[in-house]
Image (cartoon, helix red, strand yellow):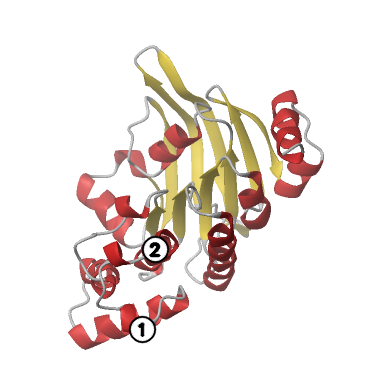
């Protein structure tokens, strides 16, 4: 990417995570998690409920305040900045421009009382777009890219199926061309056939836009299809990490072996 920084000829990670730790009182959420994420790379985080994967995602995306650690993001103008020490206005602007968050429930990421076109247009307006015709044209274009017919542009999300709501949430998030997308169980709660269609769509958009992404899921089929690398969490700790196919085809940790075998037995 043209705005990627380099250091001594090497590409700077888009995101550098160091020592992220979060407690809820005496209960551990996650402890000492660290990794680098490079431009255009997709990282999958898997584990059963209570493993710490959602806590980690919340800390990375600025939705939770960790007790320790750094989240360094390679900003376009200033290079790596610790997002945990940014001011609230800086974090909000980052969330409107270079970051996006796809919720498991589309209702958490959409304005349900606003039209489909309005949902997409709102994010454009948040970064300064003001020409109504241009905003509507971009909204229509993005609805098409997520397979929502143009004649639904003025319909509210309440009139959409669950799969269409999720595709609309994706359009709303990606219209401003973010460089990093956080996804929390993006196919959770959808029928299998709808999941497959959504995954194909996501895979195409990730490749087309050169997106970096962090995907939290309990579904190994999702990370198999979308993620370049995989991190396995248990009881708040990372127990295994590596290339996705390598981890899934030859798991080294007993817990990972259990996860993989439980899927194979279904």
User: Circles 1 and 2: CB distance less than 8 Å?
Assistant: no
> Which residue is the extreme one toward the right?
250
* Image-based side of 248 in relation to 124, left or right: right
Residue at figure coordinates x 17%, y 79% from the top left? 130
Q: Measuring from the top left, give residue 18's x and y in whole percent.
A: 50, 34
On residue 150, which mark appears? 1
* Image-based side of 2 in relation to 243, left or right: left
| Mark closest to the chain's N terminus, 1 or 2 | 1
Q: Tell which of 251 and 159 is nearer to you.
A: 159
Q: Measuring from the top left, give residue 40's x and y in whole percent.
A: 57, 61
Q: Residues within 10 Å of mark 1 (few under 14, many from 20)?
A: some
Is residue 246 shown above or below 171?
A: above
Residue at figure coordinates x 45%, y 73% from the top left? 146
Specify the quadrant that holds the C terminus.
Answer: top right
Residue at figure coordinates x 21%, y 72% from the top left? 128
- Indicate which label's residue lies in the foreground, 1 or 2: 2
Residue at figure coordinates x 41%, y 63% from the top left? 170
* Image-based side of 131 in relation to 42, left or right: left
Tally of numbered tags: 2
Q: Tell which of 97 and 155 is nearer to you.
A: 155
Callout 1 secondary element: helix
Determine if residue 40 is in view: no
Q: Tell which of 193 and 165 is nearer to you.
A: 193
Q: Tell which of 126 and 202 is nearer to you.
A: 202
> Which residue is the extreme one toward the top?
26
Q: Measuring from the top left, give residue 122's x and y in whole percent.
A: 23, 68
Q: Residues within 10 Å of mark 2 (few under 14, many from 20)?
A: few
Callout 2 secondary element: loop
Q: Measuring from the top left, give residue 184's x and y in whole percent.
A: 45, 46
- Calculate the distance from the C-alpha at mark 1 to the C-alpha at mark 2: 16 Å
Residue at the disc numbered 2: 161
């Amino acid at each position: 990417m043209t705005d990627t920084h380099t250091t001594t000829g090497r590409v700077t990670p888009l995101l550098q995570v160091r020592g992220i730790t979060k407690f809820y009182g005496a209960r551990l959420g996650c402890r000492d998690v660290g990794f680098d994420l490079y431009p255009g790379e997709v990282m999958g985080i898997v584990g059963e409920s209570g493993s710490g994967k959602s806590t980690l995602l919340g800390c990375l995306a600025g939705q939770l305040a960790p007790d320790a650690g750094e989240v360094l993001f390679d900003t376009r103008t200033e290079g790596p900045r610790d997002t945990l020490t940014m001011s609230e206005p800086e974090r909000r602007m980052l969330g409107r421009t270079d970051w996006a968050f796809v919720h498991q429930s589309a209702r958490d990421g959409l304005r349900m009382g606003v039209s489909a076109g309005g949902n997409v247009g709102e994010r454009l307006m948040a970064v300064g777009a003001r020409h109504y015709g241009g905003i509507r044209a971009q909204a229509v274009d993005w609805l098409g890219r997520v397979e929502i017919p143009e004649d639904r542009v003025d319909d509210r999300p309440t009139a959409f199926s669950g799969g269409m709501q999720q595709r609309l949430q994706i359009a709303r998030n990606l219209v401003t061309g973010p460089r990093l997308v956080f996804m929390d169980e993006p196919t959770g709660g959808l029928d299998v056939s709808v999941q497959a269609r959504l995954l194909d769509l996501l895979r195409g958009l990730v490749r087309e836009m050169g997106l970096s992404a962090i995907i939290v899921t309990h579904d190994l089929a999702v990370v198999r299809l979308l993620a370049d690398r995989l991190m396995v969490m248990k009881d708040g700790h990372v127990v295994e990490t590596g290339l996705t196919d390598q981890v899934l085809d030859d798991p080294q940790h007993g817990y990972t072996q259990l996860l993989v075998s439980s899927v194979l037995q279904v």
